[in-house]
Amino acid sequence: MSDAEQYRIKEEPYYRTVGDEVSLYEAAYAARMPVMLKGPTGCGKTRFVEYLAWKLQKPLITIACHEDMTASDLVGRFLLDANGTRWQDGPLTVAARIGAICYLDEVVEARQDTTVVIHPLTDHRRNLPLEKKGELVTAHPDFQLVISYNPGYQSLMKDLKQSTKQRFGALDFDYPDSAVEAEIVAHETGAEMKVAEKLVAISHRGRNLKGHGLDEGISTRLLVYAGNLIAKGIDPKAACQMTLVRPLTDDPDMRDTLDAAISTYF
């Protein structure tokens, strides 16, 4: 299997379009414009990228960013083996060489001195200097860079530089409206529509508590988890407590408030 083939998405991921985000992204890809996806956790940013990679028939390389990630983790490093040293391309370099969509997930988790290595790939140059190797990689014509982050996690310590932000076009994501979200939950889990609608109603109660005891609202991803458990025969109340309450908070009062919301519907 070639490098490109192993990164192709073989089956169509389910993605429910909620606006003009697909046509905007397709236009951005046609122009090879770097794209930034902004939205809360679990609202469908990663699924969106997977769907578009499948739709455009392009390889997708996803990198989960973290604070210990170095530039070498992205571009590559020399490794020791039985024959001495050899160069190992990092995922960003592989994507640039094979013409993949490179998706940096939660990019603000990476240090700013790490993310600057993407700059030459996001302007007219479209190249990647491998300083340790003494090579200048020119990006494949199909290469595109996509990053995502949660604006709710921004702080002075964790934010993108303006010099980085202004290299991207941006798409805003949020949780869909109630009818669409219920449709998504029912499709993803096999749960009845009535159950999906109740789960969405509970999520709205939880989202109203964001900033009032909860750092983050109940995500669509967690609703899918709950629906999966209910579809497997788990008691709805227990399923909701396990997926919609316990992961979000350890505060006893907040748990009681969310448990009361669940009891209203189940």
Image (spheres, rainbow, N blue to C red):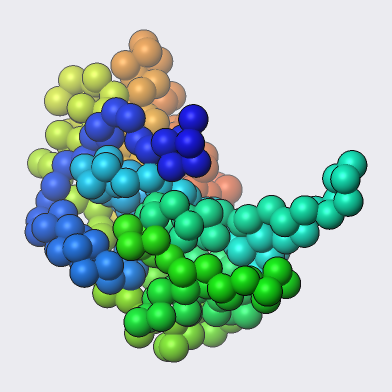
The residue closer to the viewer here, 174 or 123, is 123
- Residue 186 drawn above or below residue 26: above
Residue 21 visible from this viewpoint: no
Residue 77 visible from this viewpoint: yes
Q: Residue at x 37, y 13 (%)?
A: 232
- State the residue lying farthest toward the bottom: 163
Please state the horizontal and vertical placement of residue 241, each as a whole percent of the image. Answer: 44, 33
Considering the image in quadrants, where does the C terminus appear?
Answer: top left
* Count of numbered tags: 0
Q: Which residue is drawn at 42% across and 36% down?
A: 5
Quarter location, residue 235: top left
Q: Which residue is drawn at 52% across and 49% down?
A: 249
Q: Which residue is drawn at 16% across and 54% down?
A: 22
The residue closer to the viewer here, 54 or 186, is 54
Please state the horizontal and vertical placement of residue 46, each as a whole percent of the image. Answer: 36, 49
Please state the horizontal and vertical placement of residue 101, each as a whole percent of the image. Answer: 38, 55
Horizontally, is 77 left or right of 154 in the view?
right
- State the residue lying farthest toward the top: 233
Horizontally, is 196 left or right of 168 in the view?
left
Please state the horizontal and vertical placement of residue 254, each as a whole percent of the image. Answer: 47, 51
Quarter location, residue 184: top left
